Image (tube, rainbow, N blue to C red):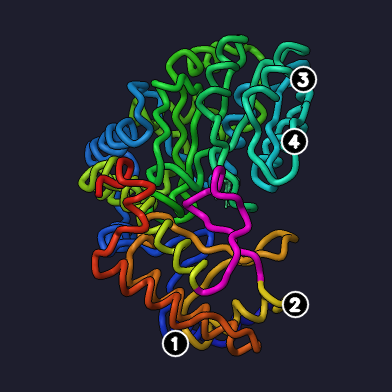
Amino acid sequence: MKISPPENKFLEELLPKKPVLLMGSGPVPIPKEVAAANSIVISHLGETMKQIVSRVQLMAQYIFQTESKKIFGIAGPSSAAMEMAISSLLWPGRKVLVLNLGTFSARFGEMARGVGAEVTELFPQGLAPIYASQVKEFLEKQSFDVLTIVQGETSCGVKNIELEQIVKLAKAHGVTTIVDSVCTLSTMPLPMDEWGIDIVFVGGQKGLSAVPGISLIAFSEKTYEFVSSRTERMPHWCLDPRRAYKFWALGEYHYTAPVPGILAMHEGLRLICQEGLEKRYQRHLFCSLTLQHCLEALGFELYTPKEFRLNSVVAIKNLNQVNTKELITYMIQQHQVEISGAFGLDIIRIGQMGEQCRLPNIEKTLRALVAGYEHFGVQLDHEQGLFEFERISNGEHDWLSHHYSDSLGL
Ligand SMILES: Cc1ncc(COP(=O)(O)O)c(C=O)c1O
């Protein structure tokens, strides 16, 4: 039977009539420079590409805060970078300790089982991060080859506040560390070399404000050396770092590189370097605290306690059991603002990563949220919430500077 083409439909007919502001857990809005770069295709091999790739690595060294030159891009989501890390270090007979805070940190375990490793999971006590004392107990009882940890668990809005101590503890026990910085890199400090992290990875679609579908991974020189000398067969061809090295270090063919993605990543990283990490961290902290403060003034309760609250994705308790799917759809359709629901928890989540951290975007989101809840019969303290926002926009930082004057530089 012959298959005929479907009726012609232009993309414009499928896209929303008005652009939607992406204020969920990612992807996030992109700057115009990133959008322009993402529309260019050049040859993936040759001098021009080689120069672009080496600039991407140079800028990534700054953002990861590492001197290691073993930084590779991956044509794939952050999960592909996670898979490269896992499959490089684990195989049957190897043991991994997975610090499991939820959906994303659990993924490490799923992947490790997939390559035949022995997986031990360590869970937090309730809604909490995992503390160094818990890890210490495990490391003293059993031996592990690898430890995996997420800096920020996007699914529940918890930050692993003792990441640095945990990584150092692992190092002292000769355990290699893999850190997921997918929703945190460039939004808060993660100095790879200073903390002694062995592998860090990130996707393009969150703090970097580049595009989804391209990721970066950094191996410490020592870890790369270990991986390159392994004799076990590598389970993945695309995700073999030794093959990625061919393209990322030598400019040779591995697979046809995701050219527009690399160019977009270049622009995302360039804008971060231009802004400077310190200033960027402050912008993220300031915007996230502004959002949190205004949400509380509106009458919301934040899901995660302040001591370990993740600022890059803020989890908020749903009110009056409103159907969050319907709420989100209403906000998109009526106010062109998209926020996120959650995986099984009665919360909503608002992102504060990259371009989301701009006061006009926060104001638009707060207004859409108020309108959304009011549509479903929940009255919020509209006036107080928006009054607080106005006050902050006019430069009144008393409430913030009281607590955070050093880190915000106010
Ligand atoms: C902390 C964290 N890790 C991993 C992932 C997976 O990223 P991707 O969907 O790009 O594979 C996400 C996605 O939201 C995330 O938030």
Query: Which quadrant would residue 82 be assigned to in this image?
Result: top right
Q: Which residue is mark 3?
A: 92
- What amino acid is labelled 1 in the image? Lys
* Label 1 element class: loop
The residues tagged by marks 4 and 3 sit, at their Cα atoms, a distance apart of: 23 Å
Whole-angstrom CA distance, mark 2 to mark 1, is: 37 Å
Q: Secondary structure at mark 2?
A: loop
Up/down of 370 relative to 157, above or below: below
Answer whether labels 4 and 1 touch (C-beta < 8 Å). Answer: no
What amino acid type should be assigned to the residue bearing mark 4?
Answer: Phe
Q: Which residues are magenta?
A: 298-318
Looking at marks 2 and 1 on the same chain, the residue that comes earlier in the sequence is marked by 2
**Secondary structure at numbered mark 4:** loop
In the picture, the disc for residue 71 is: none
Residue kind at label 2, given as amino acid type: Met
Q: Please name the residue that numbered disc 1 is placed on.
A: 17
Q: Is residue 317 magenta?
A: yes
Nearer the observer: mark 4 or 1; the answer is 4
Establish whether ligand 1 lies closer than 8 Å to the Cβ of label 4: no
Q: Which residue is mark 2?
A: 1
Q: Residues within 10 Å of mark 2 (few under 14, many from 20)?
A: few
Tell me residue 78's x, y (percent).
54, 45
Q: CA distance from mark 2 to mark 3?
A: 47 Å
Element at label 3: loop
Horizontally, residue 114 falls left or right of residue 410, namely right
72 inside magenta stretch: no
Contact, CB < 8 Å: mark 3 with mark 1?
Answer: no
- Name the residue carrying label 4: 123
Above or below: residue 89 compared with residue 370 = above
